[in-house]
Amino acid sequence: VTESQVPPSDDPDPFEPNDDYNQATGPLASGDSVQGYISWADDLDVFFLQTASRQPIQVSLTGIPSGEDFDLFLLDDQEVLASSEGTTQEEFIEFVPPAAGVYFIAVAGWDGSSSASSPYTLTVTYDGGAAGTTPQGARAFGRVVNQANGNLLFGGIFGVLNPGVTCSQFSAAGGGPSSELVAAAGETNAQGFFELLTVPTGQSLAAFFLFDGRRICADGFETIPDGSLEWDMGLIEVSFD
């Protein structure tokens, strides 16, 4: 997913820029409905969600402005997994993911379709519609910086692997954020901040960071004490040497 053009100065979309994987808005919770705009002819809106199971992912796109044609896509970090490319004012995808993990949603106008005056509505459901259920694990958070210069690293993916999974196993499986070996992953924002949900507790976990086509992984990175609901991983310095 790529996007090269600059949005108009009066763009009403609150999520811009969200034109590629690194800028994707999220994670969207199951049951969330958000409103966005295809604000110019080549605009592309990208969102992401993180599933904890292989139950179906359902995505609906409604409120497409009259006379416009918007299309809907579900992707992993490499390819389009499902799409809905009709010509009505609604699009819908239902897809059974091959594994728990991070998935991306893209909304695009077809053949120049756009409307900065009227929003569309995007609604997602996954994990059996389990919005509001009690998370099984801790909420963990932290910030990532470049060890060499102290710069905050925006648009990377920080995550932890399932208990017992090593970096070598993760690398051999392709090392992507949607891998079934990943327990939790989240994107770093402009302040280098990330948030992980439902992180396993009481066991040593390997951690990884994906940034600008590079992958860093460390075994035995963190053990969150049993019973923790929140855990601050602090400032994480990464080296690309």
Image (spheres, rainbow, N blue to C red):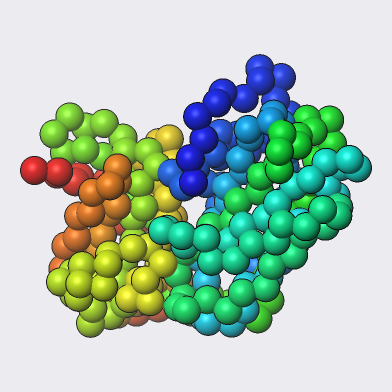
Residue at 52%, 35% in the rendered image: 3
Q: Residue furthest front?
A: 111
Is the residue 209 above or below the residue 36 in the image? below
Residue at 52%, 76% in the rendered image: 97
**Residue 123 location in percent, x, y?**
73, 60
Residue at 66%, 17% in the rendered image: 9
Q: Looking at this view, is 67 or 107 the one in front?
A: 67
Query: Image quarter for residue 11?
Result: top right
**Residue 34 location in percent, x, y?**
72, 50
Q: Is residue 60 left or right of residue 174?
A: right
Q: Residue furthest top?
A: 9
Whether residue 215 is visible here, answered yes or no, is: yes
Q: Quadrant of the C terminus?
A: top left
Whether residue 130 is visible here, answered yes or no, is: no
Q: Residue furthest left?
A: 241
**Residue 73 location in percent, x, y?**
62, 57
Is the residue 36 above or below the residue 4 in the image? below
Count of numbered circles on the image: 0
Q: Looking at this view, is 168 or 26 the one in front?
A: 168
Is the residue 114 above or below the residue 126 in the image? above
Residue at 60%, 51% in the rendered image: 106
**Residue 80 location in percent, x, y?**
52, 60
